[in-house]
Amino acid sequence: MRSAGLIGTLRAVAVAGVLALLPTAAAVGTAAAAESEPPSAAATTEVTISPVDLAGPAISTVKVTVTNAGPARMRSLTVSFGGPVGWAVQPSTVRVDGSLTAGASSDATFRIQVPEQRGGFTVRTFTATATYQGGDGLGSATATRTQRSGTPLARLADAYNNVAVTDESNTAPGDYDGEGNSFSAQKLADVGLRPGGTVDALGARLVWPNVPSGTRNNVTASGQAVTLNGSGSKLVFLGSGVTSGASGTATVYYTDGTSGTGTFGFPNWSFDPANAHGATLVASSDGRNRPSGYGNAGIKYRVFAHSIPLDPAKQVDFVVLPSNGNIHLFDMAVAP
């Protein structure tokens, strides 16, 4: 592959060689596509990834373009490209012949094996990295491109898949913990958690699920994507855990195509310390409903709040929940 703008004078090569000896540092390149990350203000070398055809099973061709926006000639340019785990790429690395003058661009072409498209919503990430000498003197630049398939759920209630609350007169439908146990609707009401009622926690106004007892009213997290609008400093989750391993990472996607992640967790709904995983206790109800009826009086069964940070300058588009079924969510909301 030949690059545009190749100039071969000995004087230019010598100058580029001297500039290549300047100290180097990590750089993040730009990805100009609408769904790619915005350019870093500190970077000058630009890396862009063409759209990937996701209509598999097929072999898709992807073009990675590197533009030398630095003052010096760019030499020894190597471009690597990769997609989701398990997606084969050929070749994995392309070495670009010659050199690039300031402002010149070069393309590297890759072929990626796209599997059969699955139903539901998915976000797939592709990454390209350019390494070089000269150019902006930084030595490397990276760009990522995210592409979506399907549509996020319109609201968290559309993801309800578990019965967490039952009436003491009919406990049979409950199965919050996988053993047929559930919160008592009466005891939750005693501590202020009623269907459709508001819950103020960690600066957010949340809502207790407005559904009848004995019906699905919470989400066991398994990577569901849910639409959520607003801007603020943090995203607050209302829920509790089953077992002591109820933690995971949520990903927030913004309307400008960028994203951020945050890790949170909840204590087990009973017995764990109330501040486990850094959570905040919201309410404690007395006892629980078992398949045989109400019981375990004197033991507290609890609901918690936790949060992850947001970029307050951006508008939230949707949230991808953690992939951990031990995390149970009743609501989530943006806090100022």
Image (cartoon, rainbow, N blue to C red):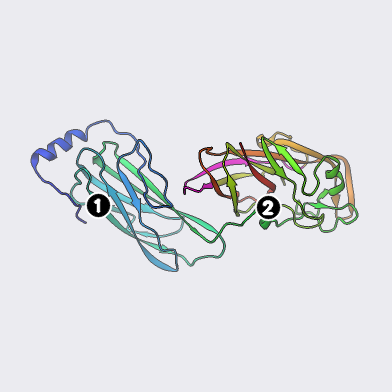
> Which residue is labeled 2 in the image?
220
Segment tinted magenta in the rendering: 252-269
- Identify the element where label 2 is drawn: strand
In this rendering, which labeled residue sits more in front, label 1 or label 2?
1
Could you tell me which residue is drawn at 17 percent across and 37 percent down?
16
Is 304 magenta? The answer is no
First reached walking from the N terminus: tag 1 or tag 2 = 1
Does residue 333 sit above or below 163 in this rendering?
above
Indicate left or right for 17 with 59 as reference. Answer: left
Q: Residue furthest top?
A: 23
**Residue 320 percent coordinates (x, y):** 57, 50
Indicate left or right for 26 with 158 as reference. Answer: left
- Identify the element where label 1 is drawn: strand
Q: Amino acid at mark 2?
A: Thr
**Residue 281 percent coordinates (x, y):** 74, 36
Quadrant location, the C terminus: top right
**Residue 119 percent coordinates (x, y):** 56, 65
Q: Amino acid at mark 1?
A: Ser
Dividing the picture into quadrants, the one containing residue 287 is: top right
**Residue 133 percent coordinates (x, y):** 24, 40
Is 268 magenta? The answer is yes
- Residue 76 image label: none
* Front in this rendered view, residue 303 or 34: 34
Could you tell me which residue is drawn at 44 percent across and 69 percent down?
57
Q: Residue furthest left?
A: 10
Dividing the picture into quadrants, the one containing residue 267 is: top right
Density class for disc 1 (Cα within 10 Å; few <14, some 14-19, many ≥20) is many
Could you tell me which residue is drawn at 41 percent across and 68 percent down?
58
> Which residue is labeled 1 in the image?
106
Could you tell me which residue is drawn at 19 percent across and 41 percent down?
73
Does residue 313 sit above or below 91 in this rendering?
above
